[in-house]
Every structure is written in C-alpha cells, then in structure tokens.
Amino acid sequence: MAVSYMKLWHLLLDRRMTKGDLERAAGVSHYTMTQMGKDKDVSTEALRNICNALNCELNDIIEFIKDEKQS
C-alpha cells in the first residue's frame, strides 16, 4: 500500500503556507519534508507534530492508496 500526502499539499495551499512554514511550525526536519514530497513513509511523531501544528486530523493530510496488484 502506497502513501500519498497530496491532501497535505492542498491544505497548505488553502492556508497559504509553504513547506518551510510547516517545517518551522511543526518542528520537523527538511529531510522529513523531502521524504513526504516523494510520498515516502515518515515517522508517526512527524505526522503527529504536523497535525498539531495545522490543528487537523491524520486523515486530513495523508491517504493510503492500494497497490494495483492487491486489487
């Protein structure tokens, strides 16, 4: 199952925030943001910090996508 952070990027656009703004607000590293930009797994701690900074739920920023092979 793949992960997508497209919801997060849309949320940032809606709030007129940059990825750098989110890094600072959530206290996550640039490396973490880079990994998310590549739809890679990141720590639950990073996801929790992002949700806290944006005052949102996990399902507001992340989506799991079934692999076509698993369908």
Image (spheres, grey):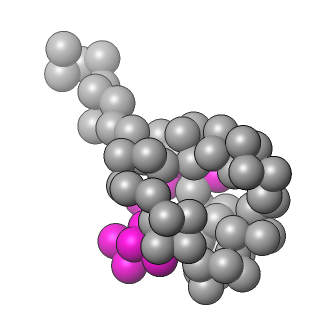
Left or right of 53 in this view: 37: right
Q: Residue at x 39, y 72 (%)?
A: 48
For the C terminus, give its image quadrant.
top left
Q: Nearer the viewer, residue 28 or 67?
A: 28
Say if residue 3 shows up in the picture.
Answer: no
Farthest-out residue, left: 70
Nearer the observer, 11 or 44: 11
Q: Residue at x 57, y 48 (%)?
A: 8
**Which quadrant of the figure contains the N terminus?**
top left
The answer to whether residue 19 is above or below residue 65 is: below
Q: Is residue 5 left or right of residue 13?
A: left
Q: Which residues are magenta?
A: 37-50
In the visual, does 16 lie left or right of 2?
A: right
Q: Is residue 58 magenta?
A: no
Residue visible at 48% across and 40% down in the picture: 4
Q: Is residue 26 above or below residue 1?
A: below
In the rendered image, residue 60, in percent from the top left (x then y), is placed at 44, 46
Residue 50 place in picture, x, y as percent = 52, 69
**Where does residue 46 sit, x and y in percent of width and height?**
46, 75
Q: Is residue 24 left or right of residue 56?
A: right
Residue 44 belongs to magenta span: yes
Q: How many marks?
A: 0
Which image quadrant is residue 13 in? top right
